[in-house]
Image (cartoon, grey):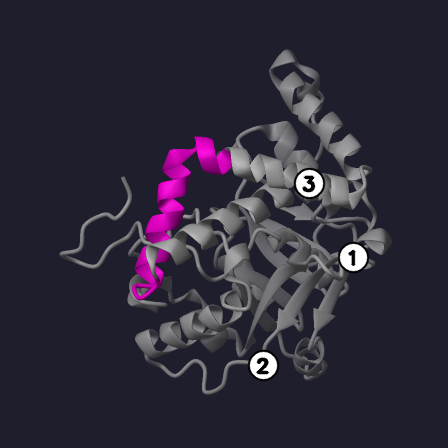
């Protein structure tokens, strides 16, 4: 699937691409090997129209089951937390782990809402704080690199800013049907967006796009290996941190703005918080720039530690002399 992946794009998009250049439905998806995918899609439809409180209750149960049965993932979460917060007691680590799996389970039950509901309905459950930071830069005819971190509600963050012309990237699913179905929800008819497959369009298309006043929604916390990365602190541990944000900003004069999305249970809102733009960035020093990115991510993640995706292998690339931390 990955080798043949194409972008998802709305008919009106910031790069002027033709709709036939993007992913489309294939009749092969009716073959038996895709029937399980159709069952998942059907279940997702019914989940969408269950009461939110009921979905959250089921999601809490799902999270509890994952926590208790998937020991491998549980150990990754606890290892990441132990590395990032060396002064926290084991009881605190256990508590955050428990809360994380609860939020993860709820996200599995709630994400189908993004797939089935239209943009107007979705905007009613989304909010954005400090949107003027983006508007101010775009009004200057300047692109914005809007970088964020993996939270369990990440896709709601993308939906909350969908009024802007946006480019982003996605990791293709191996199942072509699910890749098409989920991907098209990121490029609804009312959007102005192009979402590129991550492996194919990292720089060439992005650099060209950032010459225009658009928003590049970018995940800045992934460990993609030592290439194009430097080791700088992420909380209490050295992490392979991508240098691409600084390079893109330097090459395109794009403003660099941090943001994060969390679910607010009391308000029943998916809240995107936009922080002030990075200053004196890029500085010309890769490590200084990478540290500034991580520092902002730490501040944003700390707004609700329980909703950060601690089950990622955040530290799989290690500085020389340090062993691989995951079993």
Residue at image location 39% in from the left, 83% down from the top: 283
Question: Circle 2 sits on which residue?
Answer: 276
CA gap, disc 3 to disc 2?
36 Å
Question: Circle 3 sits on which residue?
Answer: 57
Residue 135 in the image: state x and y as whole percent.
71, 78
Residue at image location 59% in from the left, 35% down from the top: 62
Whether the magenta-drawn stretch holds residue 25 is answered as no
Residue at image location 60% in from the left, 56% down from the top: 168
Q: Secondary structure at mark 2?
A: loop
Label 1 neighbour load within 10 Å: few <14, some 14-19, many 20+: some
CA gap, disc 2 to disc 1?
24 Å
Residue at image location 73% in from the left, 46% down from the top: 114
Whether the magenta-drawn stretch holds residue 73 is answered as yes
Label 2 neighbour load within 10 Å: few <14, some 14-19, many 20+: some
Residue reaching furthest front?
A: 91
Q: Earlier in the sequence, mark 3 or mark 1?
A: 3
Q: Main secondary structure of the magenta part?
A: helix
Front residue of 291/206: it is 291
Front residue of 154/218: it is 154
Q: Which residues are magenta?
A: 66-88
In this picture, residue 149 sits left or right of residue 60: left
Question: Circle 1 sits on which residue?
Answer: 125
Residue 176 in the image: state x and y as whole percent.
60, 29
Q: Earlier in the sequence, mark 3 or mark 2?
A: 3
Residue 2 in the image: state x and y as whole percent.
50, 36
CA gap, disc 3 to disc 1?
18 Å
> Is residue 293 among what the camera can see?
yes
Residue 109 in the image: state x and y as whole percent.
67, 39
Label 3 neighbour load within 10 Å: few <14, some 14-19, many 20+: some
Q: Secondary structure at mark 1?
A: loop
> Is residue 150 among what the camera can see?
no
């Amino acid at each position: 699937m990955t080798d043949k992946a194409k972008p998802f794009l709305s008919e009106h998009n910031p790069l002027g691409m033709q709709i036939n250049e993007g992913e489309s439905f294939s009749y092969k998806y009716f073959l038996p090997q895709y029937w399980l995918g159709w069952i998942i899609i059907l279940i997702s439809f019914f989940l969408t129209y269950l009461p939110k409180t009921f979905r959250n209750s089921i999601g809490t149960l799902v999270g509890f089951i994952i926590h208790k049965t998937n020991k491998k993932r549980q150990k990754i979460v606890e290892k990441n937390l132990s590395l990032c917060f060396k002064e926290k007691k084991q009881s605190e680590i256990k508590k955050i782990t428990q809360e994380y799996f609860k939020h993860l389970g709820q996200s599995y039950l709630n994400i189908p809402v993004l797939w089935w509901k239209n943009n107007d309905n979705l905007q009613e459950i989304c909010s954005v704080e400090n949107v003027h930071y983006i508007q101010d830069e775009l009004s200057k005819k300047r692109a914005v690199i809007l970088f964020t971190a993996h939270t369990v509600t990440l896709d709601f963050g993308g939906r909350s800013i969908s009024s802007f012309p946006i480019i982003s990237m996605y990791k293709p699913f191996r199942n072509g049907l699910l890749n098409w179905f989920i991907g098209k929800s990121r490029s609804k008819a009312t959007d102005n967006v192009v979402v590129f497959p991550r492996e194919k369009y990292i720089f060439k298309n992005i650099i060209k796009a950032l010459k225009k006043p658009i928003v590049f929604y970018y995940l800045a916390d992934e460990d993609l290996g030592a290439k194009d990365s430097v080791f700088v602190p992420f909380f209490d541990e050295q992490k392979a941190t991508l240098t691409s944000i600084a390079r893109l900003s330097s090459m395109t004069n794009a403003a660099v703005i941090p943001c994060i999305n969390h679910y607010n249970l009391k308000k029943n809102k998916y809240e995107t918080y936009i922080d002030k733009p990075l200053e004196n960035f890029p500085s010309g020093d890769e490590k200084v720039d990478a540290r500034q990115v991580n520092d902002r991510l730490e501040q944003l993640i700390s707004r609700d530690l329980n909703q950060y995706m601690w089950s990622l292998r955040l530290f799989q690339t290690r500085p020389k002399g340090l062993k691989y931390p995951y079993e």
